[in-house]
Amino acid sequence: MAPFLETVKSFDDVPITDAGVDTDAFLEAADGELTGLMSSVGSKAFSPVISDIQGNNKKVRDRYLAAPLQSATLEQLVTNEKSNKVGSATEGLMWLLRSLAFTCKSLQHAQANPSEELKVAFTKGYDVSLGPIHRSGGFFSTAIGYCPPRKSFYERLAANPGGEPISQEILDKELNDWLTGLDTIISRMDGFYTKGKHGEILKSPL
């Protein structure tokens, strides 16, 4: 076993070419975020959040498996689905990216503000990601109230089963690389969705 971020695919390792974001690698990284990182946040209150992410991930995965050659990148998947006027992967991907943006913005804030508790970081992350999209807070905002203490969360990420925990320096580098890769994908796909009038990944707060 190894620390969490060393056991899952990092978004920083997802290939991005002129054709777009590699679909299979992106979904593998998103699976890691779902099964590991959100679980590290803890609390059964996050179960609806995880279920929501899981459902949207499945929509994208199903479309990829149904038409792999036409869905090699996220951009190709959306374009192909739209031209064939079938499926719900485009909308599923949009909501998956929105949920990932919530995680990304929250943890970026946590990394930039080491004295603040996780609940504060996730509240601020919600305010600039899902908040402007949701009419009400819904189960996401409810779940935020059950965030674990910052110390516990980072200890879980640093834990090395069978060995010594990794240092804060190493954890920060791995987490920052993971977040940078995710942020790059979200920004790229937000531009793609907006330009193609497929929807909005990010929406500016009023």
Image (tube, grey):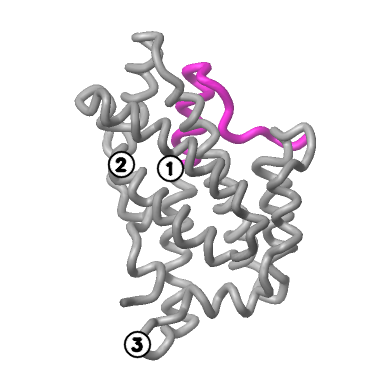
Q: Secondary structure at mark 1?
A: helix
Task: Please give left or right for residue 188 compared with residue 40 in the image.
Answer: left
Classify 140 as above or below 74: below
Coordinates of residue 49 in the picture (x, y in percent)? 60, 47
Coordinates of residue 188 in the picture (x, y in percent)? 45, 36
Q: Mark 3 belongs to which amino acid?
A: Gly
Task: Please give left or right for residue 157 compared with residue 119 in the image.
Answer: left
Q: Which residues are magenta?
A: 185-206
Crowd around label 3: few <14 · some 14–19 · many ≥20 (10 Å): few
Residue named by callout 1? 185
Coordinates of residue 53 in the picture (x, y in percent)? 52, 43
Q: Secondary structure at mark 3?
A: loop
Question: Which residue is more in the foreground, 110 or 55?
Answer: 55
- Res. 16 mark: 2
- The quarter of the picture where residue 13 lies is bottom left
Disc 1 to disc 2, C-alpha distance: 8 Å
Disc 2 to disc 3, C-alpha distance: 35 Å
